[in-house]
Image (spheres, rainbow, N blue to C red):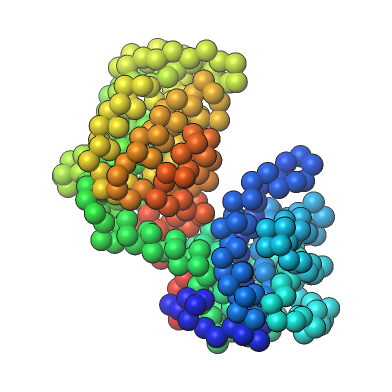
Amino acid sequence: MKGIMDLPLAGKRVLIRVDFNVPMDKEGNISDDTRIRRGLESIRFAADSGARVIVASHLGRPKGQVVPGLSLKKCADHLSGLLQKQVLMADACIGAAVSDTVASMASGEILMLENLRFYPEEQADDQNFARELAELCDVYINNAFAVCHRKHASVHAICGFVKEKAAGHLLMDELRYFDSAMGAPARPLVAIVGGAKISSKLKALKNLLHRVDKVLIGGAMANTFLKASGLSVGESLVEDDMLETAKSVMAESAKRGVRFYLPVDAVVAREITENAVGMVVPVQEIPEGWKVADCGPATVRLYAAALANAKTVVWNGPMGVFELEAFSGGTMGLARHVAACHGLTIVGGGDTDTAIHKAGVAEAMGYISTGGGAFLKLLEGESLPAVNALEQ
């Protein structure tokens, strides 16, 4: 797979697919521009190389309809400020008007296309839509790791219509760091897996057992493992249909010599709400009628000890309901210990990303992935359709 640096860009029309699917506040203003900043390197590189740069992205879930509140205009304005140069804004993605605008661009100019998902053909991986996008450019650059697990027209079908195509800086970084962690890692390799459901992480867990030295489990999925181990977890969220699966995962872990860690204490409450009052109990003493909302301080200390000799750490999923202050201690505490690791630390998933920023330790992490679903797909041992299309 080629990288953007491997192609001559001067004078070329270069279409860069980015992921500017940024969060916005109630007034429609960008509340976190991390994804835009992460895409700057390739846009700046192409513009400085003398290309006519066309930037394409999606925003939100307009479901194939034009939704004014999901226009990329504010992203274009924000990008202008970051680059300190004007970014032109198209009112569509395809069509004669867009083609004319591209034709009139000077070398080094940048044009933002309107929201790709205003077109139902985008998510349908429509060949004709992909062809029309491809006709706008001489070179196609995929720099949108977060959607590479999707077969969407702007990352998948388009590759069949463009001869010159390559990965952007961000996509190359994502794949390089993941390969460093899972391909030939420095050991011990520790995986931290949190979140609500085993069912959503089962394939990842099974794949990880073939690769890692230790697994630390957190979040509501830990309740299912605890119940499968014979403990009562009160009224906590549990996947009862996954209890036998949980037992098989633990048995496979023991068979392979992978050290499998579960919480030893928990923060519980009668209701998981903003004003709830929690208490810390050993996992053997979770009261009937109470719910687990976080792992406790003893678990954080245990997991910190497990991380002490780690050379590589991969983390996906929080330890509890960290959005509520009363139940954020486990995730925040673990984030600080991961940040203190001397080895390579890779964090993936939107919630985990949010958590480490909340903990104030983002700068101390080795790499923060921009893609939740794509990162999880790699953890499952699967290939990414958009990357496969780029390689062919």
Instruction: Tell me where residue 155 sits by quadrant.
Output: bottom right
Quadrant containing the C terminus is: bottom left
Q: Say left or right for 361 vs 302.
A: right
| Vertical placement of residue 312 versus 177, above or below | above
Q: Residue at x 22, y 50 (%)?
A: 187
Q: Is residue 339 visible?
A: yes
Q: Say left or right for 203 vs 195.
A: left
Nearer to the camera, 318 or 107? 107
Q: Is residue 241 visible?
A: no
Q: Say left or right for 221 vs 389.
A: left
Residue 365 x, y percent position in the rendering: 41, 46
Q: Residue at x 79, y 42 (%)?
A: 27
Q: Residue at x 60, y 63 (%)?
A: 40
Residue 291 x, y percent position in the rendering: 46, 20
Instruction: Tell me where residue 234 sits by quadrant.
Output: top left
| Vertical placement of residue 188 versus 278, above or below | below
Residue 256 x, y percent position in the rendering: 17, 47
Nearer to the camera, 298 or 41? 41
